[in-house]
């Protein structure tokens, strides 16, 4: 392989690494979500203005032990229950004990955006709860809230695919919601094994190239001094 190619491959890997290590800060600031996986939802198809999802974002934590979600709705100031159902055992049902429903009760105020998270299993049993100032304030528009959940609380290790659907509803029971995607699910493997295999293969290729070039150089020097 020509040296230029090796350099190009190295640069490619350097570009790939920060993408997998990008960290989301739970701080009610949403610039860190730019470029993260997301699905937009139509404006105006929610039960009410307050419960009209406009986008759902998801990504993995930098420490590979948690996932982050971000919900966006139309600009509205009322309280709302955002939620994501996760088919953790990937069997097409959200109702198993292995599955999870993550509910974020978001109640924007003038100067803060409190988010109260409860994690339940697929049968409604409580797993854990926590809260933080992770949403926009009313003054900021009152439309976005972010949160993080550990793999441990989800009962997953991140290496197998899960199915997800996001919702926004007025009540904790989430009986009448705006769902995203409409009539489908998001399939996601938080830790993409194939990505790391490709990255590992790339690193091995570079090591091989360096070894080969150094070997040839030594051989060439020896050869020329001998002649
Ligand atoms: Ca943030
Ligand atoms: Ca919508
Ligand atoms: Ca399931």
Image: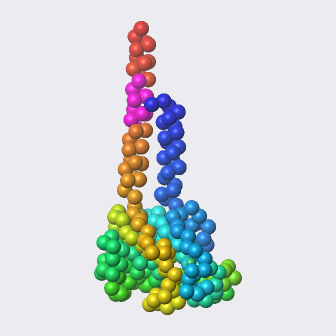
In the rendered image, the residue lying farthest to the top is 227
Q: Main secondary structure of the magenta part?
A: helix
Decide: is 18 above or below 5.
Answer: below
**Considering depth in this image, is 122 or 107 the residue closer to the camera?**
122
Residue 83 lies within the magenta run: no
Measured from the top left, where is residue 138 in percent x and y?
Answer: 66, 84
Image quarter where the N terminus lies is top left
Region in magenta: 207-216
**Considering depth in this image, is 124 or 150 the residue closer to the camera?**
124
Can residue 114 be seen here? Answer: no
Decide: is 94 above or below 196.
Answer: below
Measured from the top left, where is residue 203 in percent x and y?
Answer: 41, 43
Left or right placement of residue 227 versus residue 56 in this view: left
Residue drawn where x is 48% and y is 57% of the image = 20
Residue 212 lies within the magenta run: yes
**Numbered label tally:** 0
Decide: is 147 above or below 200.
Answer: below
Residue drawn where x is 41% and y is 78% of the image = 85
Residue drawn where x is 42% and y is 43% of the image = 202
**Considering depth in this image, is 192 or 45 the residue closer to the camera?**
45
Image quarter where the C terminus lies is top left
Left or right placement of residue 75 versus residue 153 in this view: right
Can residue 167 be seen here? Answer: yes
Measured from the top left, where is residue 179 in percent x and y?
Answer: 49, 78
Measured from the top left, where is residue 117 in percent x and y?
Answer: 47, 83
């Amino acid at each position: 392989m020509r040296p230029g190619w090796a350099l190009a491959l190295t640069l490619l890997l350097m570009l790939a690494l920060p993408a997998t290590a990008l960290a989301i800060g739970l701080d009610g600031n949403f610039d860190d979500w730019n470029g993260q996986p997301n699905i937009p939802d139509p404006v105006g198809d929610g039960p009410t203005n307050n419960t009209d999802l406009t986008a759902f974002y998801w990504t993995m934590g930098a420490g590979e032990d948690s996932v982050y979600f971000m919900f966006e709705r139309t600009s509205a100031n009322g309280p709302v229950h955002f939620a994501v159902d996760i088919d953790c055992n990937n069997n097409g049902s959200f109702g198993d004990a292995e599955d999870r429903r993550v509910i974020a009760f978001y109640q924007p105020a003038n100067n803060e955006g409190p988010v109260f998270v409860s994690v339940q299993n697929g049968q409604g049993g409580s797993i854990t709860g926590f809260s933080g100032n992770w949403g926009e304030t009313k003054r900021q528009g009152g439309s976005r809230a972010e949160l993080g959940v550990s793999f441990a609380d989800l009962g997953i290790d991140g290496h197998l695919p899960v199915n997800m659907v996001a919702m926004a509803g007025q009540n904790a029971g989430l009986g009448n919601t705006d769902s995203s995607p409409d009539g489908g699910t998001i399939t996601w493997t938080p830790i993409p094994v194939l990505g790391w295999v490709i990255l590992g293969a790339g690193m091995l290729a570079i090591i091989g190239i360096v070894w080969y070039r150094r070997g040839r150089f030594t051989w060439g020097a020896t050869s020329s001094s001998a002649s």
